[in-house]
Amino acid sequence: MMNNEKYIKLLHCLKNMEKVILAFSGGVDSTFLLKAAKGALGDNFKAVTIQSPYIPKWEIEEAEQLVAELGVAFEIL
């Protein structure tokens, strides 16, 4: 399967879910999925990040900035 076909399949899977909560770390993988979800679902999803003593504050701030730039609903738990 070509990479483009895999991406189209991902978008189709996301659209079938209708509404999604996405665990978002701000890393490469979750950012890719965040952008795909935004493309597939529009505003029918929310990104969440879990705050813990093991996650540096700057990582959460970067994640918060990225979702703001993309116009994605976001919550820190």
Image (spheres, rainbow, N blue to C red):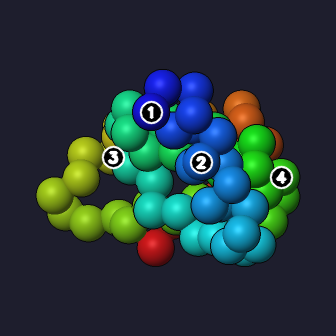
The kind of secondary structure element at disc 3 is helix
The kind of secondary structure element at disc 2 is helix
The residue indicated by pointer 3 is 57
Distance of label 3 from label 2 (alpha carbons): 35 Å
First-in-chain label (2 vs 1): 1
Identify which residue is drawn at 16% across, 58% down. Answer: 54
Residue 23 occupies quadrant: bottom left
Distance of label 4 from label 3 (alpha carbons): 28 Å
Q: Amino acid at mark 3?
A: Lys
Look at the image and tell me whether residue 21 can be seen: yes
Between disc 4 and disc 1, the foreground one is 1
Spot occupied by residue 52 in the image (x, y as percentages of width and height): 26, 66
**Residue furthest toward the front?**
1
**Tag on residue 1?**
1
The residue indicated by pointer 4 is 42
The kind of secondary structure element at disc 1 is loop
The residue indicated by pointer 2 is 9
